Amino acid sequence: MEIVVKLYGDLKRYAPGDRPHFALRLETGSTLENIFRILAIPEGHHTALINGRRSSPDATVANGDTLVIMPLISGG
Amino acid sequence: MNGWMGKMLRVDLTSGVCSARPMEPSVAKDYIGGRGLGIHLLNREVDPTCDALSAENQLIMATGPLTGTGAPTGSRYMVMTKSPLTGAITCSNSGGMFPTEFKRTGYDAIVFTGRSETPVYLYLDPETAELRPADHVWGKSTHETTDALLAETDAKARVACIGPAGENRVLFAAIMNDKHRAAGRSGVGAVMGSKNLKAVVVKGKGRIPLADPDRFKAFNKQKLASFKKEIQETPLGLMINGTAGVVMATQNFGVLPTKNWQQGTFDGWEKIDGEALTRRFLKKNSPCYSCPIGCGRKTRVDDPRFAGEGEGPEYETIYAMGANCLIDDLAAITKANYICNELGMDTITMGATIACAMELVERGYLPEEEVGRSLQWGDAEALVELTRLTGARQGFGDQLAEGSFRLAERYGHPELAPVSKKQEFPGYEPRGAQAMGLAYATSPIGGSHMRGDPAYFELFGVPEFMDPHQWEGKAVVTKAFQDLSAIIDSAGLCIFFAVRHLAAKDLGVAPVGILEYLNAATGADYTLEELMQAGERIIHAERLFLTRAGFARKDDSLPERLTKTPAPTGPAKGLVCHLDKMLDEYYQIRGWTEDGIPTQEVLDRFGLS
């Protein structure tokens, strides 16, 4: 299966190529934890949204999902 | 007294007499200071039904017991009065350097009464309190006024003043201090203008007396060390891109108000977010007094169309003048922000009112001939020109100066105004952040997130995440955050440090760290329970003023656009805000009737009868 990953802020440096937005092929049933490991993103210190919903590391992604990983934000 | 200076200055603008009054210790303890002291004085002295722009209204500027003490972010003051925009109260607070200097004059608060016949300013230092002629600065911008008054008084003094917008009684005129800092919301500047009061110039001396300096210093050291450790582990977004960094969060959660609140996502968001601001315009950070965060931004725009230099924009400005108007030109947004600072206007209401006018034009309710120019979505030139015209109340600016509700009502469609109690919302869409809708509806100043900010637990995960799409369980947490905000606003602190570092790390957000600071500073021996009760007391006292002014459940409302029309785009697609369900629960928790009126039992319990 394939998902779209969008990295923002200082998370962009974990993109496998030049682009912070990219398609990622995964095994069915992959969790966010698996994805963080594949992309070498350390745990914590960021917010992960699957289709705009904040998700914990054990959440699974499905084919066609969009995964946003952005720094923790505050203020406003 | 310690922490508190122990006296207030009363300035009768009608007679020109300035007189000192003692601060009663029991009032200080029960209401803390700042916002709490302000509502106590308003309830005691101002008729809630009076005309906000008449001599009958009073204008209160109040610091808190932690202002100027060296506590992190202890830099704030509060402006309280009856609002000409909403008819309710204002709670406009600001930081920078002015509030600390003000407190070092020896006064906790200044109460302005009456109305001067001619333009005046107040000069205040520990030996002097006098009204001086201000005819020579009337009509001048906030920057020109500040420079002129510093030149004729003391270069090291600090100035809070109004610009032409306040003089012209723009209903959302701000009071600007240190040139770029705004007590921005609800028209405090218009009240100042109506009193012919152009400025307050303060020059202090000495330190704020502390009850137990060693205890204070030890706790301060501990707090700053843990803050430093935390930001090394997890960089704080506010320090990197200022509040503008929030655009990334609200867009991706689908709660970035766009196209006059029709949707919660904006395609052009990356052109106006914090990274773009840092990359294109940032000169340096600009912290308030005693702030380890420093979210303020000194910026410069070289683009010849919108060239200028100043501070900002903040997140709220970017939402209101950017996404909400479909404008992705950050140079224009920044320029319009500079104009608001110089003319003295609230950027949120300005941007939201222009967005509302754009929709009125699009739907054919407002002819462009009346605007005097084209006014299509995304028109950056229009944003800048209309902002300028509004401050001067020239041309169509005279109508924009009334805010979005009166504008939309005039053209027959008040439902298009993004307001609660006639005040425009800040930049979080309640269809995708349910508690925010409850916070807007129950804020005593109308549309505001700063009187208990649910973005912390719905979007930022502080102290922990609650699902932003669920309404269940939100009333109790919103209430806890509102009570905490009342304490923060009254103590003289800023929400940006206190919520994360001075409150318990659970959804009850008990003010444990503020308690230690307050007791070390004042020696008032607050128990945690007493301090939390003071927070609640302030909320009830504010509600009492509103009740007497005629406000009730009918006014704790959101536009049907948010409660009946499902969000059309983004993660919140298909959702509406379930305000009514949250309100029922909220009133019950507060001890208010189903109609939102504090019960006699509650008033008795908090000494408000």
Image: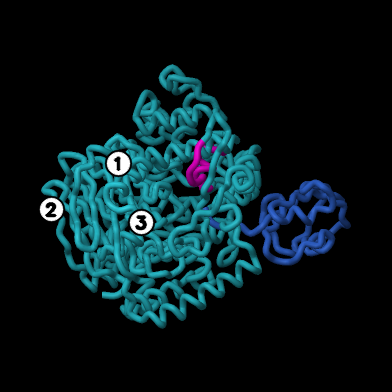
Q: Are marks 3 and 2 in contact (CB under 8 Å)?
A: no
Q: Nearer the viewer, mark 1 or mark 3?
A: 3
- Earlier-in-chain disc, 2 versus 1: 2
Residues behind callouts 2 and 1 on a single chain: yes
- Earlier-in-chain disc, 3 versus 2: 2
Q: Residues within 10 Å of mark 3 (few under 14, many from 20)?
A: many
Name the residue beneath numbered marker 2.
B17
Q: Could you tell me residue B587's position as x and y percent? A: 39, 59
Q: Chain of mark 3?
A: B
Q: Which mark is residue B378?
A: none
**Residue visible at 58% across and 51% down?**
B246
Q: Which chain is depicted blue?
A: A
**Residue visible at 15% across and 51% down?**
B12
Q: Amino acid at mark 2?
A: Val
Q: Is residue B81 on the magenta stretch?
A: no
**Residue visible at 35% across and 71% down?**
B533
Q: Amino acid at mark 3?
A: Phe
Q: Amino acid at mark 1?
A: Ala
Color used for chain B? cyan
Task: Looking at the picture, tell me which residue is in the foreground, B292 or B153.
Answer: B153
Using the numbered discs, state the Cα–Cα distance from disc 1 to disc 3 in whole angstroms. Answer: 20 Å
Q: Could you tell me residue B417's position as x and y percent? A: 44, 36
Name the residue beneath numbered marker 1.
B190
Q: Chain of mark 1?
A: B
Q: Residues within 10 Å of mark 1 (few under 14, many from 20)?
A: many
**Which stretch did the figure color magenta?**
B308-324
